Image (cartoon, helix red, strand yellow):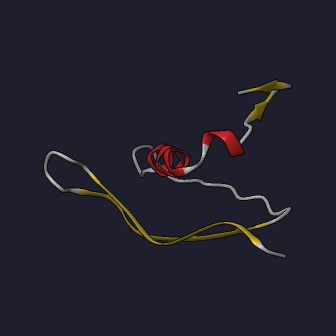
Amino acid sequence: MKNILELKDFSVSLKNNNRKILNNINIEIKEKEFLGIVGESGSGKTTLLNSIISFLDEKKICIRWKNNSF
């Protein structure tokens, strides 16, 4: 199966002081795979997802949750 999302050495820094929030994240998600992201509060789960979403082309994605599309 082909990768539908691949991150290699993905890092996120704060603009105002260059402090790395996420450092060298590597993820491969293939078609029909499910991925769970778990961790303690403040570990960067939401930052990771928001960063990935900001790179996606809005015209090519559809987010569905409880029978609603966004």
Near-viewer residue (56 or 1): 56
Number of marks drawn: 0
Near-viewer residue (36 or 8): 8
Residue drawn at point x = 54 percent, y = 48 percent: 49
- The quarter of the picture where the C terminus appears is top right
Q: Is residue 43 above or below residue 67?
A: below
* Image spot of residue 8 (x, y percent): 50, 74
Near-viewer residue (2 or 39): 2
Residue 5 picture quarter: bottom right
Residue drawn at point x = 49 percent, y = 43 percent: 50
* Image spot of residue 9 (x, y percent): 43, 74
* Image spot of residue 20 (x, y percent): 27, 59
Residue drawn at point x = 84 percent, y = 76 percent: 1
Q: Residue furthest left?
A: 17
* Image spot of residue 10 (x, y percent): 43, 67
Q: Is residue 33 above or below residue 47?
A: below
Residue 42 picture quarter: top left
Q: Residue furthest top?
A: 68
Image position of 12 (left or right of 70):
left
Image position of 41 (left or right of 4):
left
Residue drawn at point x = 78 percent, y = 33 percent: 64
